[in-house]
Image: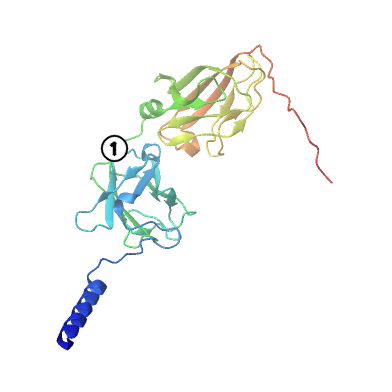
C-alpha cells in the first residue's frame, strides 16, 4: 500500500508539472492605452493616395509582427496617411516624420504623416512589436520618378458635388474641359438648398473654400475664388431664389500649388430662379433667459 501511495503521489506531481509548463498560456496583446494587438491582419492603412480607402497590410513571411503596403502610380504632389486598428487612428506624435526614417505612430490626436512623392511608388512598412507604439517606415519602392502633374491631369480628376444644387453629393459630376483655356466648366447648376454646400473632388483630394457671397443678378460681376485653404464646404450664402442657375468654371494652372492658384473658381449667375425660399415654421418657440 505504501509503495502504491508513493507511485500515486509521483504521478500527481508529474501531472502538476506538465500542467504548469505544458499548457498554452494567454498573452496580453492589448497594446496598452489606445493600442491594438500584435496581429498584422487587424491593422489597416488609409490615405489621400486614393480617397482615403482602407487597405490591409501584407504580413511578413518571417516576422509576424511586421507588414507592408505599397501605393503605386503616384503623382508629384503631397500625400498624407494614417494607420488604423479597428476604428482607432494612429498618427504621428512628437517625432518628425520623414522618408526612410522609422517613426512611432502613437498619438490618436497627432498629425497625419505627410510627404511629397518624388518616386512613382512607395512601400509603407509597419512594425507592431509594441502594439501601443506601432512604427512606420516609408521607402521608395521604385526608381521611376512620380507622374508629372499637367493641366490635363488636373482636369481629368476634377469633379463637383454637393447638396446646394440638385446634383447632390453622390455621385460627383464631371464638367466640360476646354484645353485651349485650361478651364473646366460646370454648367446648369440649379440651387435647391439655400443652406446646402458643395465641393470639388480633385487630384489632391476634396477641395473647399467655405462660404462666399455670390452674384445676385444675371448681370452681376462673377465671383472669383482662389483660396482653398479656408476650410468648410463651399456655400453660396446669398442665393436670391430657389431654382437659380449657376455656372461654375475652374481655371487650372499645374505650375502652381493649391495654395497659390492651381485652381481658380469663377461663379456666374446665369438664370434667376422664380421661387421664393420657404421654410417650415416651428410648431413651438421657447424663450429662455434670466
* Of residues 14 and 107, the one drawn nearer to the viewer in this rendering: 14
x, y percentage for residue 261? 49, 34
* Of residues 100 and 83, the one drawn nearer to the viewer in this rendering: 83
x, y percentage for residue 226? 54, 32
10 Å crowding of disc 1: few (<14), some (14-19), many (20+): few
Residue 221 is left or right of residue 133, and the answer is: right
Residue annotated with mark 1: 73
Residue 248 sits above or below residue 207 on the image: above
Q: Which residue ends up furthest to the front in the rendered image?
A: 1
x, y percentage for residue 62? 19, 57
Quadrant for residue 174, please give it. top left
Residue 287 is left or right of residue 230, and the answer is: right
Element type at mark 1:
loop
x, y percentage for residue 285? 77, 32
Q: Which residue ends up furthest to the right in the rendered image?
A: 290
How did the renderer colour the structure? rainbow
Quadrant for residue 22, please give it. bottom left
Residue 238 is left or right of residue 49, and the answer is: right
Q: Residue at x 32, y 39 (%)?
A: 74
Q: Residue at x 40, y 33 (%)?
A: 203
For the N terminus, the quadrant is: bottom left
Amino acid at each position: 500500500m505504501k509503495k502504491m501511495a508513493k507511485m500515486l503521489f509521483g504521478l500527481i506531481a508529474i501531472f502538476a508539472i506538465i500542467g504548469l509548463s505544458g499548457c498554452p498560456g494567454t498573452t496580453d496583446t492589448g497594446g496598452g492605452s489606445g493600442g491594438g494587438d500584435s496581429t498584422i491582419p487587424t491593422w489597416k492603412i488609409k490615405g489621400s493616395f486614393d480617397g482615403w480607402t482602407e487597405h490591409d497590410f501584407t504580413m511578413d513571411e518571417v516576422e509576424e509582427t511586421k507588414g507592408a503596403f505599397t501605393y503605386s502610380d503616384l503623382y508629384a504632389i503631397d500625400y498624407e496617411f494614417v494607420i488604423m486598428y479597428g476604428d482607432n487612428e494612429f498618427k504621428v506624435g512628437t517625432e518628425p516624420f520623414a522618408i526612410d526614417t522609422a517613426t512611432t505612430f502613437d498619438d490618436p490626436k497627432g498629425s497625419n504623416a505627410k510627404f511629397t512623392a518624388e518616386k512613382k511608388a512607395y512601400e509603407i512598412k509597419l512594425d507592431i512589436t509594441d502594439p501601443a507604439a506601432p512604427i512606420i517606415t516609408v521607402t521608395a519602392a521604385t526608381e521611376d520618378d512620380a507622374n508629372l502633374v499637367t493641366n490635363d491631369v488636373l482636369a481629368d480628376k476634377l469633379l463637383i458635388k454637393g447638396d446646394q444644387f440638385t446634383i447632390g453629393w453622390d455621385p460627383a459630376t464631371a464638367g466640360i474641359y476646354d484645353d485651349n483655356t485650361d478651364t473646366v466648366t460646370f454648367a446648369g447648376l440649379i440651387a435647391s438648398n439655400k443652406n446646402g454646400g458643395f465641393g470639388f473632388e480633385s487630384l489632391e483630394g476634396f477641395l473647399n473654400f467655405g462660404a462666399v457671397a455670390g452674384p445676385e443678378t444675371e448681370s452681376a460681376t462673377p465671383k472669383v475664388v482662389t483660396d482653398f485653404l479656408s476650410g468648410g464646404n463651399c456655400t453660396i450664402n446669398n442665393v436670391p431664389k430657389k431654382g437659380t442657375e449657376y455656372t461654375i468654371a475652374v481655371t487650372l494652372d499645374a505650375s502652381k500649388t493649391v495654395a497659390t492658384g492651381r485652381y481658380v473658381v469663377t461663379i456666374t449667375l446665369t438664370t434667376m430662379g422664380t421661387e421664393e425660399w420657404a421654410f417650415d415654421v416651428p410648431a413651438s418657440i421657447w424663450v429662455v433667459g434670466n
